[in-house]
Image (spheres, rainbow, N blue to C red):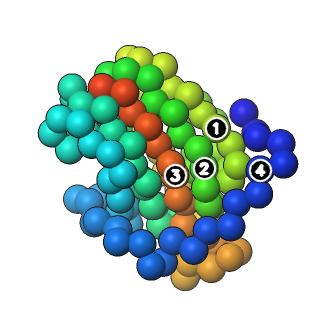
Amino acid sequence: MKIPGLAIQLDASDLPWRETKQEGVAWLPLFLEGESGAAGGDATVLIQMAPGAGYPAHRHIGAEDVLVLAGGYRDELGEYRVGEHIRYPAGSSHAPVALGDPSQAVTSQNPACVLYAVAQGGVELL
């Protein structure tokens, strides 16, 4: 769902991102319950994916809410851009990949994807 009138300006370059095992993907935990947001724990995080980078397929233990703060991504269910809210129901799975050209530098024309995500019960990698 596109949120009408939502204007987001974000400079994520100075945030204390934590690298992940996935090239081009970093995260910033805002709230973690349990084992780093793994299965059994709730998590509220910011996720940054460089253009063309993706997060591996995973299943949601509980519902996950995602708000696209910058750039966009695609998965098996569609394509989502800045200002859109997506709800993934418990038990759903997907493998998001950031929009953009991985062979080009990150710019305002080729932005990194930044997400605000709230995962209830965590996720399970597939």
For the residue carrying disc 1, how many other residues have a C-alpha within 10 Å: few (<14), some (14-19), or many (20+)?
some
Residue 80 seen in render: yes
Sequence-wise first label, 3 or 4: 4
Q: Which residue is mark 2?
A: 68
- Tell whether label 2 touches label 3 (CB within 8 Å): yes
Q: Nearer the viewer, mark 1 or mark 4?
A: 4
Q: Nearer the N terminus, badge 3 or badge 2?
A: 2
Q: CA distance from mark 2 to mark 1?
A: 7 Å
Can residue 23 be spotted in the picture? no
Is residue 20 found left or right of 97 in the rendered image? Answer: left
Q: CA distance from mark 3 to mark 4?
A: 15 Å
- Earlier residue among tags 2 and 1: 2
User: Disc number at residue 85?
Assistant: 1
Q: Quadrant of the C terminus?
A: top left
Residue at position x 15%, y 39% in the image: 35
Calculate the distance from the C-alpha at mark 3 to the C-alpha at mark 1.
10 Å
Mark 1 / mark 4, whichever is N-terminal = 4
**Among the 4 quarters of the image, the one containing residue 28:** bottom left
Does residue 45 appear left or right of residue 70 in this picture?
A: left
State the SS at label 1: strand
Badge 4 amino acid = Leu
Determine whether the residue tagged by mark 4 lies in a helix, strand or loop: loop
Please, is residue 14 above or below residue 123 in the view? below
Labels 2 and 4: the sequence-earlier one: 4
Q: Which mark is residue 115?
A: 3
Label 2 environment density (alpha carbons within 10 Å; few <14, some 14–19, many ≥20): many
Q: Nearer the viewer, mark 3 or mark 4?
A: 4
Q: Residue at x 60, y 50 (%)?
A: 68
Look at discs 2 and 4 and give the one toward the viewer.
Answer: 4
Q: Residue at x 33, y 53 (%)?
A: 29
Give the tally of numbered discs. Answer: 4
